[in-house]
Amino acid sequence: MRGLVYHGPNDIRCDDLADPTPPDASGLVVEVETTAICGSDLHNYHGHMGPDTGYGIGHECIGTVVEKGSEVHRFGTGDRVLVPGLVGCGACDPCRVGAVNACELGNSPVYGNNMGLGGAQAEAVAVPRADFALRRIPDGISAEQAVTLTDILPTGYYGALGAEISPGDDVVVIGAGPVGMMAILSAQLFGPARVFVIDSVPERLAMAERLGAIPCNVEEDAPEQIRAATDGLGPHSVIEAVGADATIQTALWLVRQGGAVSVVGANLNMEFPFPMGIAMARSLTFRIGICPVPQTWPTLIPLVLAGKLRPEFVFTHRMALSEGAAAYELFDSRRDGVVKILLDPRR
């Protein structure tokens, strides 16, 4: 089969790889129907995930079961399934309710990060502990909607939950990338008075405005604009969807006294200079974590089916898997109005 492989910083190639097989009797193989590039994949692309090379990348995909182990009971060949980017042990109490990020055995590998699962930006992917890990795609959910349910929509919703939004609140989303867009959609489920969004790319700010957010360009002193609009108090909640040290610091300084900061942007800095004294003096709530994708499905799938959430707008570009190198370069550049790229493994 073909799959995208990390060969070093800024070096992604579509290589021929061994066909996957079920990892054990409880696993199966999914033929990938469509896959996507996530903002967190850029950590791999930029070489921030360590010195290793030669591994498959990507963690967002949907597809069809084509082979299964003898101990898989909930799925059969031909079933179309959501493949979440993170897989738990399936046996502990948190995992049984979908909270795979809190696996008590610490057994929660991620696809595409050289953790033994392979990459999802490929023609096929092996899935361990399939009865626990997967979910059939319900009738009425499109392929584009389904792909968002494997990571970015749950992550945006997880960010909104962590931000403790109440009706009438002011909310800021920092970063109008794919997860930031999903955070805007999700924040609106909680009845805020206003949702502001901070970014520097005009096309992304325009898209956010079409969603009902108030665009604030970082190059025009966005924090001061928001402070002025909130009588100098700042917003009640900030969802940080970038993951950079500077944007997390902005979130902590911008939120009002007693407010909540929810970080869903990926930050791997072990020496992040957290302003502990400021956070304590201002009684701030700070949350950061990896989204437990399966735990969000009972809420998000009905909302998508009912048309209350329409996340598919986020896909601005569609490219072939064979164009993976060009797709990553385009996504990283943020030019041509790109927000999210779908990859077709059949091409």
Image: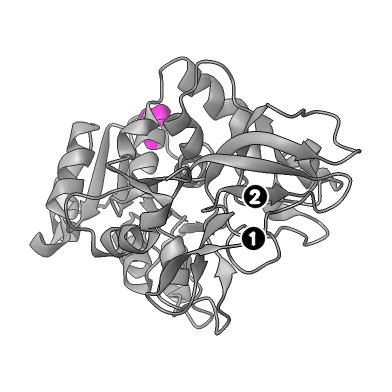
Q: Residue at x 30, y 58 (%)?
A: 331
Residue 231 in the image, given as x and y percentages of width and height: 17, 48
Disc 2 packing (10 Å; few <14; some 14–19; many ≥20): many
Q: Is residue 158 magenta?
A: no
Look at label 2 and name its amino acid: Val
From the viewer's perspective, is 47 left or right of 73?
left
Residue 125, numbered label: 2
- Residue visible at 36% across and 64% down? 325
Magenta span of residues: 187-191
Q: Looking at the magenta stretch, what is its main secondary structure? A: helix
Circles 1 and 2: CB distance less than 8 Å? Answer: yes
Query: Which type of secondary structure does the marked residue at label 2 adopt?
Result: strand
Residue occupying the point 77% across, 41% down: 130
**Residue 38 relative to residue 105: left or right:** left
Please report whichever mark, 1 or 2, sits nearer to the chain's N-terminal start. Answer: 1
Asked if residue 44 is positioned above or below residue 82 in the image, the reply reads: below
Q: Which residue is mark 1?
A: 118
